[in-house]
Amino acid sequence: MKRQWWDWGLAIASVGIFLTALGMVFLYAPREATMGEIQRIFYFHVASAWIGFFAFFVTFLTGVIYLITSQRRWDVLSLSSAEVGLAFITMTVITGSLWARPVWGTYWTWEPRLTISAVQWLLYVAYVMLRTSTLSQERVARFAAVYGIVAFVTVPLSWFAIRWWRTIHPEILSGGEMAITPRMLHTLLVSLAAFTALYVTLLRQRALLERDRDRLAALQARWVAEGDIGDV
Amino acid sequence: MSEHLIVAYVIFCTVPLALSLSIAWRRRRVRRVLRRHTTVDKPSRI
């Protein structure tokens, strides 16, 4: 019962912060002088990208811990974080494209940051597909842990792409300083808090789904072992 | 206001909601089978 209250509290808090951030994007943040209204995509786009990267980092870290300990809970965290991270990165890629059309004059261009983002998205789609494999759970978990570690390479690559190579993607963190006004910074920070809360809520729900699946699998295995399983 | 901006924020609102509903729906399905397994004598395959 306590757990349910905690889950509901977390979900309500996430929605509350999300709506606050949404209000700040449209009512508090100033209109950007060069790009105009379309710049308002930036707040949720950046927050979604950063939390997506963080989610993939969690997949990387829990993958390493799983390979060392072989404990199922780390694999569950790894899988859950990758699925939530993929949703966040999907939003980032689509909304980045929507921003690019009026600013760059095209929805997509094969510049370094965007190319790495496309590769990253495909890699994590493949990761989620891999998890539906019919091989034994342990083999899939082990393979997915290694895959999650290797796929994480795309995160630092994407982060440094705009610093290492010639690119048209804007850079907001330059020399450790933010190139935005205080009101824009407040809005970005609240958006970051909103996406962090959303990430924690979705991660927990996804991990609980996996726990229920494990319980069911254990129950079915027990019945099969006893040779007494019914039909549909 | 730009239509691209509106579409972007519709995406920002619907994708997390869709993921949340998808997780809730999958969990509900698993829990229903789990309940059946624990309340009847013989479990069924899913």
Image (cartoon, coloured by chain):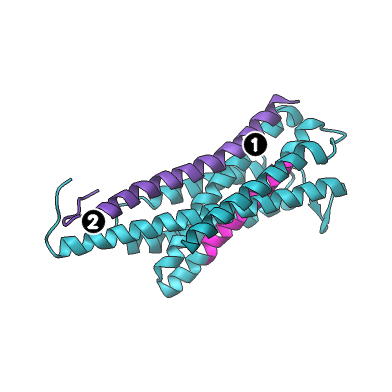
Magenta segment includes A53: yes
Q: Which region shows up in magenta?
A: A42-61
* Residue located at (65% from left, 33% from top): B8
Q: Which chain is cyan?
A: A
Residue B45: x and y, percent? 21, 50
Whole-number angstrom distance, CA of label 1 to CA of label 2: 47 Å
Q: Toward the viewer: A52 or B11?
A: B11
Question: Which label sits in the foreground, 1 or 2?
Answer: 2
> Would residue A203 be found to the left or right of residue A157 on screen?
left
> For mark 1, does the 10 Å Cα neighbourhood hold few (<14), some (14 to 19), or many (20 or more) residues?
many
Q: Which mark is residue A121?
A: none
Judging by the rendered image, the residue that carries numbered circle 2 is B39
Classified by dominant secondary structure, the portion drawn in magenta counts as: helix
- Chain B as rendered: colour: purple
Residue A45: x and y, percent? 68, 43
Judging by the rendered image, the residue that carries numbered circle 1 is A95
Q: Is residue A162 above or below residue A33?
A: below
Chain to which mark 2 belongs: B
